[in-house]
């Protein structure tokens, strides 16, 4: 009788995991291609980092997650694409560190892995569903504050390479005078 109950519980667990795997495949197949391509690189980078650190499993924990983000924040940013080159074809200066939006992208990509691992039963049954841990939220808030403080201290011109660069101060003065003098 005890053996029957254990077998019944095991069969139910197999059905639960099959349903979870089916849902995961469905969700993944309907994810936008741009999200897949953005997250895949970040997720692969996490798994490579995980192996290089000597972890024996790929399961995500709060502390492992925080360590990964801390190391990502400290490395130089990878800049790709057209925005990297200025009009003269010269490579523009690359930021010293990874920005807040990039870190948030890493958090989203890794949280997806963590939730998928949980859904697929890789954690104990009583393990709580992963949500963004408070330490990760605090980390992102501090990263955002660091970016703003850095921009403020270096007087970053947020209007650089915009249409404002196309209008000379003389033209701007003439436009203002034109509209101020215009009769209503």
Image (tube, rainbow, N blue to C red):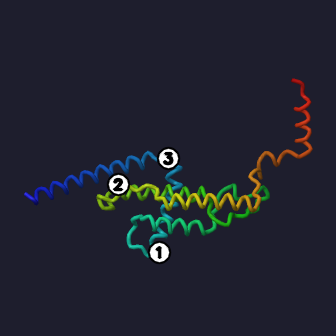
Residue name at image x 74 percent, y 52 percent: 158
In the picture of the structure, the residue carrying the numbered disc 1 is 53
The residue nearer to you, when weighing 146 against 179, is 146
Q: In which quarter of the image is residue 184?
A: top right
Residue name at image x 37 percent, y 59 percent: 117
Of labels 2 and 1, earlier in sequence is 1
Taking the image as shown, residue 92 lies to the left or right of residue 102, namely: right
Position of the N terminus by quadrant = bottom left
The residue nearer to you, when weighing 159 against 86, is 159
Whether pointer 1 and pointer 3 mark residues with C-beta atoms closer than 8 Å, the reply is: no
- Residue 32's disc number: 3
- Residue 3's disc number: none
Q: How far apart are marks 1 and 3 (CA)?
A: 31 Å
In the picture of the structure, the residue carrying the numbered disc 2 is 119
Q: In which quarter of the image is residue 124?
A: bottom left
Q: What element carries label 1?
A: loop
Q: Up-down: is 23 above or below 54? A: above
Taking the image as shown, residue 97 lies to the left or right of residue 116, namely: right
Residue name at image x 89 percent, y 46 percent: 169
Question: Which mark's residue is nearer the viewer, 2 or 3?
Answer: 2
Q: Distance between the residues labelled 2 and 1?
A: 25 Å
Of labels 2 and 3, earlier in sequence is 3
Whether pointer 2 and pointer 3 mark residues with C-beta atoms closer than 8 Å, the reply is: no
Question: Which mark's residue is nearer the viewer, 1 or 3?
Answer: 1
Label 3: few (<14), some or many (≥20) within 10 Å? few
Q: Where is residue 18 in the image (x, y as percent from the top left)?
A: 28, 52
Q: Is mark 2 on a helix, strand or loop?
A: helix
The residue nearer to you, when weighing 4 against 136, is 136
Of labels 1 and 3, earlier in sequence is 3
Residue name at image x 10 percent, y 60 percent: 3
Q: Where is residue 20 in the image (x, y as percent from the top left)?
A: 32, 51
């Amino acid at each position: 009788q005890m053996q029957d109950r254990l077998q019944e519980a095991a069969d139910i667990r197999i059905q639960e995991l099959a349903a979870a795997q089916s849902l995961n495949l469905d969700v993944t197949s309907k994810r936008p291609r741009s999200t897949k391509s953005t997250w895949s690189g970040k997720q692969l980078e996490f798994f490579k980092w995980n192996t290089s650190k000597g972890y024996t499993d790929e399961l995500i924990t709060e502390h492992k997650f925080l360590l990964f983000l801390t190391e990502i924040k400290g490395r130089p940013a990878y800049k790709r694409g057209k925005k990297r080159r200025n009009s003269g074809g010269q490579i523009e200066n690359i930021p010293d560190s990874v920005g807040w939006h990039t870190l948030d992208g890493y958090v989203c990509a890794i949280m997806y892995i963590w939730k998928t691992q949980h859904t697929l039963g890789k954690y104990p049954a009583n393990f709580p569903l992963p949500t963004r841990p408070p330490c990760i939220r605090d980390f992102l808030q501090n990263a955002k504050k660091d970016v703003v403080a850095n921009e403020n201290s270096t007087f970053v011109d947020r209007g650089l390479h915009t249409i404002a660069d196309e209008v000379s101060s003389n033209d701007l003065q003439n436009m203002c005078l034109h509209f101020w003098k215009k009769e209503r």
